Image (cartoon, rainbow, N blue to C red):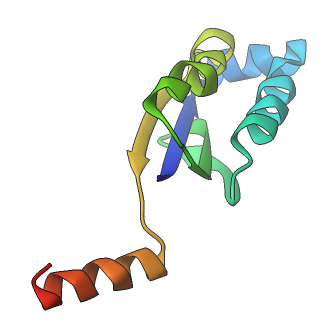
Amino acid sequence: MRMVLKARIPTDAGNEAIKGGKLQKVLESALAELKPEAAYFTLDDGDRAAFFYFDMQEAWQMPVLLESFFMELNAKISLQPVMNVEDLRSGLRDLMSGS
């Protein structure tokens, strides 16, 4: 299932992670593990934030994919399913056909 992972990194933890080399390590590891179709880096309410759009096969993958953000970056995490335009079209088509 296509998911969006949002990792919001508090400023103090992010500053320490940059100084210690952890931020780049965690992000590179996440990119390798998630193999996202897209990844974006921005600000969220004054904190650093990363958004990864990826395919998650099974719920048991959550600890593998998320724990480094919690443990290494003290990040706040959200994970939720998302649709691309083709998914939306398929869903609306099924809705309209009564399926």
Q: Is residue 84 left or right of residue 55?
A: left
- Pick the residue in front: 91 or 36: 91
Residue 25 drawn at (x, y percent): 86, 24
- Pick the residue in front: 72 or 98: 98
Q: Quadrant of the C terminus?
A: bottom left
In the rendered image, the vertical position of residue 64 relative to residue 90, given as above or below: above
* Residue pictured at 36% horizontal, 78% vertical: 88
Tell me if I can see residue 46 in this picture.
Answer: no
View extreme (left): residue: 98
* Residue pictured at 66% horizontal, 17% vertical: 68
Residue 96 drawn at (x, y percent): 15, 89
Residue 90 drawn at (x, y percent): 35, 82
Residue 30 drawn at (x, y percent): 73, 34
- Pick the residue in front: 98 or 7: 98
In the rendered image, the vertical position of residue 83 relative to residue 73, given as above or below: below
| Residue 47 sits in quarter | top right
